[in-house]
Amino acid sequence: MTQQVGRPGGWIDRYFHVTRRGSTLGRELVAGLTTFGAMAYIMIVNPAIMALAGLGRHDMIMTTIAAAVCGSLLMALTANLPIALAPAMSSNLVFAQIVVAQMGIAPAVAFTMVLIGGTAFVALSLTHWRQRIVLGFPAPVRNGIHCAIGAFIAHIGMISGGLAVKGGQGFSFGSLHDPAVLLCLAGVVLAAALQMLRVPASMLVSIVVLTVAGCFVPTPGGGTVTRLPSTWLEWPHYPTGMLLSFDFHGFLSHIGVVLPVTLYFFLGDFFDATGTMMAITRRAGLTVEDGQPVLGRAAFAADGAASVIGSVLGTSTVSAYLESLVGVEAGGRTGLVGVTVAVLFLLSSFLWPIITAVPAVATAPVLILVGLGMLSDMGRMDLSDSGGLLAPLLMILVTVMTGNFMVSLALGLLLYTALAIAGRRWADLTPILLFLDVVFVIYLVLATNMGDA
């Protein structure tokens, strides 16, 4: 009798350790479907953000899907963990809005920065330096980075949804006479309510509802907020011009300015991946297998390699998604979850015409809620330690008021260092912190001379 691949003892069971981890093939498939539903919004949101860098929205849909497929399969097949990957919601905004739009760096140079950051991640994943970096980087500054990026993402969401409008005194609230503004406000409430009620795929559901509602909401210039395409399904075609679009000469000629951002791409992915993968594996009860840590070199190398592959394909940093937790809650314990997610992303590539029709008003509430979720890290700050509190708060303030994340990061690092010296906390002055201080001082000098700060 032919051996069933899904039964205990089958090759799929043996490869992914399904039975050993107390799961079943059906449970893994359901967990993969649940994880996909929770993170599918990235197919819509990431292209909208990358369009800020002047990149084609259709091209970015295809590269986003390709990166999610490759990253999730890489994690599944090499590390056997129920963790899905896709372009990160923090790095994509830094790539598009800060590096390209604000700093004037060409997208090809920015892709080179992502490539170098991902390569450094892979290299360090194979050494013992990984743990030293985690211990040597100040937690307050790390929290400040996360919160500042969250504030920036919410800021962009407010603008793209028409809730914040530029005026003579900075920003003012959008006109409540505008139906699109009212639709966006309703979307924020809807997405927040769905999230609170733990509705599966709440972000995706809110985007779909607002897109459909936009078909009936008029715009001042005539027409409606949502403009449906002539066809909903079409054979996908990959933008081959995005492959290997690197500019090493441009990177080297702007090394003083781009190096700090390259370090951010590396450190941001490094710490996000570390925190995310630790949370997911602990929730799944996966810590040690065969005497070895489940979250070992293979997992970190897979995350770093995914960013390298993402840059080759033509998108921003690819990283582990915290939404994988919903798949773990559904019973996922193995890499079959990632394989399922990858297959579903691949099938979704046939829907690219309808994805391009999603209006900014539909994605803005997601950006706002994702940003606010990242701001929740403020709760981890030690309110009794002014030295560990002032630096991240300054980073958030500078980011919100100026929209310049790199300056906020530089000022946060330098303030933390100054307060550590003033308080004689010599143990806090780690080599990594002092190295970053030097790099960002150089960045501030060069950026000021270029007129970017």
Image (cartoon, rainbow, N blue to C red):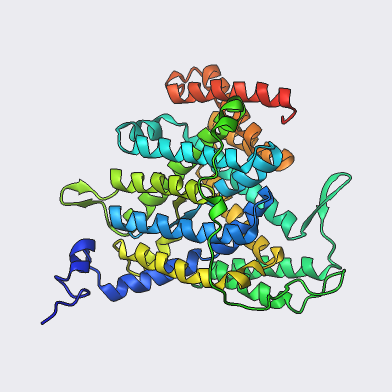
In the image, farthest residue toward the left: 1
Q: Is residue 109 left or right of residue 115?
A: right
Q: Position of residue 402 (x, y in %)?
A: 73, 38
Task: Determine the residue located farthest toward the bottom in the rendered image.
Answer: 1
Residue 195 or 102: which is nearer the viewer? 102
Number of marks: 0
Residue at image x 46%, y 60%? Answer: 323
Q: Position of residue 284 (x, y in %)?
A: 31, 60
Q: Quadrant of the C terminus?
A: top right
Name the spot of residue 62 as percent of width and height, x first. Answer: 54, 61
Horizontal relation, residue 134 to residue 242: left or right: left
Q: Residue 432, relative to residue 290: is it above or below? A: above
In the figure, is residue 405 to the left or right of 145?
right
* In the image, farthest residue toward the right: 168
The residue lying toward the viewer, choosing from 438 and 311, is: 311
Give the quarter of the figure containing the N terminus: bottom left
Question: Is residue 343 visible in the rendered structure shown here?
Answer: yes
Residue 24 falls in image quadrant: bottom left
Residue drawn 47% across and 55% down? 67
**Identity of the residue drawn at 29% across and 48% down:** 295
Q: Indicate whether 359 appears above or below 247.
A: below
- Image-based side of 179 in relation to 64, left or right: right
Q: Residue at x 53, y 36 (%)?
A: 264
Does residue 198 appear in this view? no
Where residue 43 appears, x then y in whole percent? 55, 63
